[in-house]
């Protein structure tokens, strides 16, 4: 690879640091970042299953970490990442059917992704609180 | 049909251009995504339902045959999708020699995590009595 590329330092075209962020580009990178974040959640999922398989003591230790306030904040961030990646992924699958490529449609679906993700994160948290309190 | 027709003679000689494996990567990413939609929503809903539930209740739920099957399917699709997705991230941003090691690490980690997760599910499903 290296042998074929230029060894001279070429001037670069205006890059991402000088562009004003747009909904489209922000959601594109957000889908990627949330995907990587969910990768970390996937590790946590396997640890959780292994803890459950190991026995009640190990499991309660895991639950204690998850129940602490840093654990709860991470769980909330994980929930938002999940819904963002899920709805963003559905948006991508719709695009794969060659639909929704008009600029107006792209912005509408983009805002839907953001609003749905926030609403579902809030709903999940609320529902979990209600069930936790035995309502 | 000549599958190399779209490649220039120079491109063929230098070994650059499509490696002909791109479509499978793209397609499997979609297949696992479609599978993960319902599976992860089911799992998230089940977790919400088990908020503050005790260990016993959780194990009873996890060891039910339907749960075990769905969880194994979830782990399979999840780590396959994760391996493909992380690979693209590395392909896009890492252009040094570290790239090959990162790609190897991603593959190994994903396969290992999936295996450990599936093993944990089987252990819970067919586990020894003391856990119940």
Image (spheres, rainbow, N blue to C red):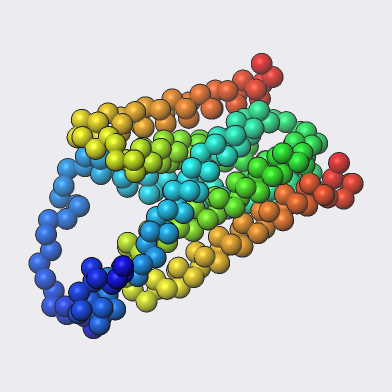
All told, the count of numbered labels is 0
Q: Is residue B68 visible?
A: yes
Left or right for A103, reference A113: left
Q: Residue at x 12, y 63 (%)?
A: A12
Q: What is the quadrant of residue A107 in the picture?
A: top left
The extreme front residue here reads B1
Q: Residue at x 15, y 50 (%)?
A: A18
Residue B107 lies, in percent from the top left, at: 52, 65
Examine the rendered structure and indicate whether residue A63 appears above or below residue B105.
Answer: above
Q: Nearer the viewer, residue A39 or B121?
A: B121
Residue B21 lies, in percent from the top left, at: 39, 65
Q: Residue at x 50, y 49 (%)?
A: B32
Quadrant (top left, top right, bottom left, bottom right) of the N terminus of chain B: bottom left
Residue A36 lies, in percent from the top left, at: 44, 51
Left or right for A73, reference B69: left
Q: Is residue B51 visible?
A: no
Quadrant (top left, top right, bottom left, bottom right) of the C terminus of chain B: top right
Q: Nearer the viewer, residue A71 or B4?
A: B4
The extreme right residue here reads B129
Residue B34 lies, in percent from the top left, at: 48, 42
Examine the rendered structure and indicate whether residue B23 appears above or below residue B124.
Answer: below
Left or right for A43, reference A85: right
Q: Nearer the viewer, residue B95 or B4?
A: B4
Q: Residue at x 75, y 36 (%)?
A: B61
Examine the rendered structure and indicate whether residue B45 appears above or below residue B118.
Answer: above
């Amino acid at each position: 690879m290296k042998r074929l590329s230029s060894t001279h330092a070429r001037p670069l075209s205006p890059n991402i640091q000088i562009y004003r962020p747009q909904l489209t580009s922000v959601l594109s990178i957000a889908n990627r970042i949330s995907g990587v974040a969910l990768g970390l959640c996937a590790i946590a999922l396997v640890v959780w299953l292994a803890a459950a398989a190991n026995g009640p003591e190990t499991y309660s230790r895991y639950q204690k970490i998850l129940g602490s306030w840093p654990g709860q904040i991470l769980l909330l961030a994980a929930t938002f990442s999940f819904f963002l990646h899920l709805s963003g992924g559905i948006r991508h699958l719709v695009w794969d059917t060659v639909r929704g490529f008009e600029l107006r449609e792209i912005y509408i679906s983009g805002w839907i992704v953001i609003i749905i993700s926030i609403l579902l994160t809030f709903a999940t948290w609320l529902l979990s609180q209600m069930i936790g309190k035995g309502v | 049909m000549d599958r190399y027709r779209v490649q220039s003679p120079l491109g063929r000689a230098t070994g650059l251009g499509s490696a002909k494996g791109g479509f499978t990567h793209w397609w499997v990413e979609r297949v696992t995504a479609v599978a993960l939609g319902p599976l992860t929503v089911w799992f998230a809903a089940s977790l919400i339902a088990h908020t503050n539930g005790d260990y016993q209740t959780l194990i009873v739920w996890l060891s039910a045959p339907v749960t075990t099957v769905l969880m194994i399917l979830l782990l399979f699709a999840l780590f396959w999708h994760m391996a493909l997705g992380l690979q693209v991230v590395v392909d896009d941003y890492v252009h040094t020699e570290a790239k090959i090691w990162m790609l190897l690490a991603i593959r190994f980690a994903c396969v290992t995590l999936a295996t450990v997760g599936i093993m944990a599910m089987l252990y819970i499903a067919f586990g020894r009595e003391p856990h119940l």
